[in-house]
Amino acid sequence: MHLPIFDLHCDLLSYLAKIPGASPSNENDIACALPWLRKGNVQLQVLAIYTDVRPGSMDLALKQAEIFKSLIDEGAFSAFQAQSWKSSDQIAALASIENAAGLGEENSSWEAIELQLDEILSKVGRLAYVSLTHHTENRFGGGNYTEGIGLKDDGRRLLDLLIERNIPIDLSHSSDLLAEGILNHIDQHQPQSPIIASHSNYRAIWDHVRNLSDEFAQEIIRRKGIIGVNFLRAFLDNDVPERLFEHILHGFQISGENAQSFGADYFYTQDFPDKSRHPFYFPLAENASKYPEILDVLAENLSAEQLEKLAYKNVLHFYQNLFS
């Protein structure tokens, strides 16, 4: 099925920033290389600015923002225009921030954090979203693989900064306690602030701390956010490829017809030390060319209108409303 695809998350920028000789067109290196995106009819790709919690993360974030700008300036991607979007051969891009360590290291002043956010915005334009954490703890809160660590005082201050700029908050890498703290803080200060999960699956299908509980998924749906299904084997089911379809259909079953979308999470895996994670993706979702085949399978259970919402319309409507 040949529909436009809007995908909410890939790590092309960190690959280009870290790997010597990296190219956005090298389909042997990364599953979201430009040839794969074109074959899959991807029309919008969100490119994450990803950093670890370590010294130098702010510099690495700025480097990735510069790379994003160069990809737009050199015509590899076009800048996404939500209100005038139309299907074309040119792939549009938005930037996001995965882990706010890229906005502020552990000892950074708040003046430096605000300047960093403004500098990144000057290079990338609008941000698709910001996640406060990755897997681990930082000055803002607890990540997926932490227990008992929620929203910290610096996290509240960062939320206020993002709310002021109307930048969506991404729950994909939040601990449950952090997600609860984010939602409570937003309800107290700006209940209409946009909340999403850019690349998350469902704990009801595969019980993993990286996945969303139905409680948090339904909160995102209630708040008119979007949820991008993740293609990583570890978060689908280590052994059953078809679980991908179950995660997607579960999103529809919990009243997420207007929220369910794609967030494949393709990244450079060749240097990943834990060999038990290889292969990272099942063959049915091993690169961005696979979207038409995935939609063909889902057509057995979803209507044409539902498939369009999943493929691109839910993401399009979200950003049209946000950017209007």
Image (spheres, rainbow, N blue to C red):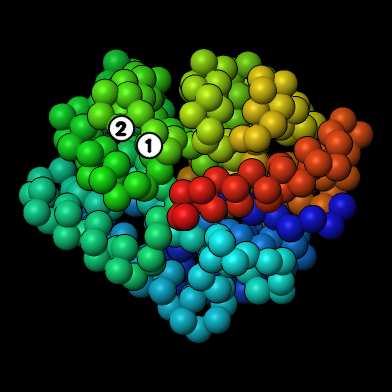
Query: Is residue 295 among the parts visible in the rendering?
Result: yes
Indicate left or right for 86 with 103 as reference: right
Residue 254 position, x and y percent, is 66, 20
Q: Amino acid at mark 2?
A: Gln
Tell which residue pokes out farthest to the bottom in this image: 74
Query: Is residue 62 among the parts visible in the rendering?
Result: no
Residue drawn at x 26%, y 38% is: 159
Q: Which element carries disc 2, helix, strand or loop?
A: loop
- For label 2, the crowd category at 10 Å Cα-Cα, with few meaning under 14, some 14 to 19 and many 20 or more, is few
208 in relation to 303, above or below: above
Q: Amino acid at mark 1?
A: Ser
For label 2, the residue is: 190
310 in relation to 12, above or below: above
Q: CA distance from mark 1 to mark 2?
A: 6 Å
Residue 319 position, x and y percent, is 52, 51
Residue drawn at x 61%, y 60% is: 44
Indicate left or right for 80 with 137 as reference: right
Residue drawn at x 35%, y 29% is: 191
Q: Please state the total of marks drawn on the protein image.
A: 2
CB under 8 Å between callouts 1 and 2?
A: yes
Tell which residue pokes out farthest to the right in this image: 300
Label annotation for residue 193: 1
Residue 119 position, x and y percent, is 24, 65
- For label 1, the crowd category at 10 Å Cα-Cα, with few meaning under 14, some 14 to 19 and many 20 or more, is many
